[in-house]
Image (cartoon, grey):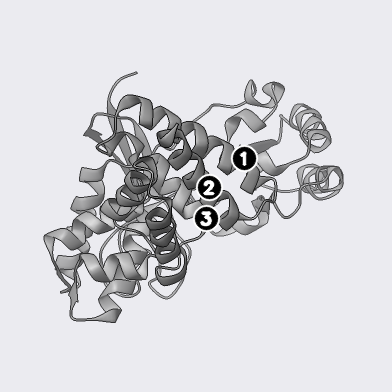
């Protein structure tokens, strides 16, 4: 796979509307990874100002519809959130009715299914048949978080575009550009904290920057971690090291601070532990044990177990393993 980041640049008709218009240019930027993202001049996630930001999914689909249909795009574009409307009746009724209804002046209409991986198996099977039946006059756009949840017959009928996480350098560059254009005083450690909290998601970085800018005159590391409910990497590492050293009481106290004082959820703690596991100053055996425990705890919490109890049990298990 060639290393190209493709940026589709959009424009919009009026600054008084939230809708985006036509694809105007396609810019190819050399990078280490391939990323498909949308840059929208004149509007973005940050409230007020003129800095473009990165958009995904719905914006891309609407831009395609506006490019094809112009002012008639609403009549020829159906958007459904499959996580809210995930049953077979949605495919049989709304999607089929929209696909078979008459329209004039265009060869086909567009149906956009957001979070399509939430569709039930029966609904996906019905959708496959619908895609075949109306292939002459309807085009489908499906977005999902996990492509493995989309049945193979549907995947084989689609061109797959994967939106990967943005690199840390790309997020840092965008954050600094926004800060400069919005006259926000942001420190270097504040930028690093925003990049860490974003974890590859530009929207998280922008929202964190905006929230931290409201809190004070300067956006620094402390304000970013406070507003994004993110623990410092060294705090998470300290908790794990305390448990592995056999000091369960200290590890539990650190966990208490993260959950109660910092406001982290159990899933947030697990995510940060997983992201930073190989960056900790731990032996390979200790890291493997940590990852094993993380997988077990994550599964139990997903199944409905008490997250605080599970996290404390994980720390206790790490402490006991050290004593053994």
Q: Is residue 315 above or below residue 187?
A: above
Q: Position of residue 40 (x, y in %)?
A: 35, 56
Q: Position of residue 310 (x, y in %)?
A: 58, 49
Q: Give me the residue at 33% from left, 55% from top.
A: 197
User: Is 271 on the left-hand or right-hand side of 34?
Assistant: right
Mark nearer the N terminus (1 vs 2): 2
Q: Give me the residue at 37% from left, 49% from top.
A: 247
Tell me how far mark 1 sits from mark 2, CA to CA: 34 Å
Mark nearer the N terminus (3 vs 2): 2
Tell me how far mark 1 sits from mark 3, CA to CA: 12 Å
Q: Tell me the residue that label 3 is attached to.
A: 266
Marks 1 & 3, CB-CB < 8 Å contact:
no
Q: Tell me the residue that label 1 is attached to.
A: 299
On the image, which quarter does residue 5 sit in? Answer: top left
Of 109 and 291, which appears nearest the observer? 291
Q: In the structure shown, which secondary structural element does the residue marked by tag 1 occupy? A: helix
Q: Is residue 144 visible?
A: no
Of 171 and 64, which appears nearest the observer? 171
Q: In the structure shown, which secondary structural element does the residue marked by tag 2 occupy? A: helix
User: Is 304 on the left-hand or right-hand side of 15?
Assistant: right
Mark 3, mark 2: which one is toward the viewer?
A: 3
User: Is 181 on the left-hand or right-hand side of 159?
Assistant: left
Tell me the tag on residue 61: 2
């Amino acid at each position: 796979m060639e290393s190209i980041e493709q940026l589709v640049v959009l424009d919009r008709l009026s600054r008084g509307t939230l809708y985006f218009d036509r694809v105007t240019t396609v810019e190819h930027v050399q990078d280490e990874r391939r990323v498909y993202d949308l840059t929208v001049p004149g509007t973005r996630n940050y409230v007020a100002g003129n800095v473009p930001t990165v958009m995904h999914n719905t914006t891309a689909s609407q831009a395609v519809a506006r490019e094809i249909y112009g002012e008639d795009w609403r009549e020829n574009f159906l958007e459904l959130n499959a996580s809210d409307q995930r049953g077979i009746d949605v495919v049989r009724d709304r999607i089929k009715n929209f696909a078979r209804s008459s329209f004039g002046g265009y060869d086909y209409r567009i149906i956009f299914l957001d979070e399509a991986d939430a569709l039930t198996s029966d609904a996906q099977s019905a959708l496959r048949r619908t895609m075949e039946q109306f292939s002459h006059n309807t085009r489908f756009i499906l977005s999902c978080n996990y492509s493995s949840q989309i049945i193979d017959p549907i995947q084989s009928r689609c061109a797959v575009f994967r939106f990967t996480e943005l690199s840390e350098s790309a997020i840092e560059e965008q954050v600094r550009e926004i800060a400069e254009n919005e006259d926000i005083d942001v420190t270097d450690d504040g930028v690093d904290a925003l990049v860490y909290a974003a974890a590859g998601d530009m929207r998280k970085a922008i929202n964190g920057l905006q929230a931290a800018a409201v809190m004070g005159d300067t956006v620094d590391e402390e304000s970013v971690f406070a507003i994004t409910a993110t623990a410092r990497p060294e705090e998470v590492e300290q908790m794990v090291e305390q448990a592995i050293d056999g000091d369960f009481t200290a590890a539990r106290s650190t966990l208490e601070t993260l959950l109660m004082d910092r406001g982290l959820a159990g899933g947030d703690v697990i995510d940060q532990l997983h992201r930073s596991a190989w960056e900790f100053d731990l032996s390979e055996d200790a890291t493997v044990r940590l990852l094993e425990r993380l997988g077990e705890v994550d599964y139990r919490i997903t199944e409905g177990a008490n997250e605080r109890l599970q996290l404390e049990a994980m720390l206790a298990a790490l402490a006991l393993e050290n004593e053994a």
